[in-house]
Image (cartoon, grey):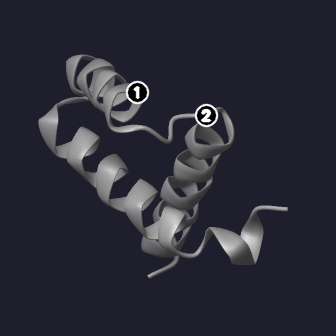
Amino acid sequence: MLGSAVEQRRRMCEARHYLRRGYTTGIKVQRLIDAIALRRGHAAAQQLRAEMRAQWACRREWLA
């Protein structure tokens, strides 16, 4: 359980990091996802995309 909580936190932080760096348009996100897929695989890239979408939806809570 602890390991999965840590992994979820890592994913959240990574997604927020990229959103803060300006990966907010479809083209920029697709380029990022393509680069991540080359390095870490398609599944990891899709997990990042899903987490970025989730964090974008609740950005008012954490983006100040």
Q: Quadrant of the C terminus?
A: bottom right
State yes or no: discs 1 and 2 in contact (Cβ < 8 Å).
yes
Type of the residue with mark 2: Gly
Q: CA distance from mark 1 to mark 2?
A: 8 Å
Quarter holding the N terminus is bottom left
Residue sitting at x 43%, y 69%: 54
For the point 58% across and 44% down, the residue is 19
- Residue 14: x and y in percent read 56, 46
Relative vertical location of residue 19 with respect to residue 41 in this rendering, above or below: below
Q: Residue at x 61, y 52 (%)?
A: 16
Looking at the rendering, which quadrant does residue 53 occupy?
bottom left
Position in image of residue 28 (x %, y %):
40, 27
Q: Which residue is mark 2?
A: 22
Q: Amino acid at mark 1?
A: Lys
As drawn, the label of residue 17 is none
- Residue 23 is left or right of residue 61, and the answer is left
Q: Residue furthest right?
A: 64
Q: Position of residue 32 (x, y in %)?
A: 37, 26
Find disc 1 in the rendering and name its residue: 28
Compared to residue 31, the image places residue 46 above or below, namely: below
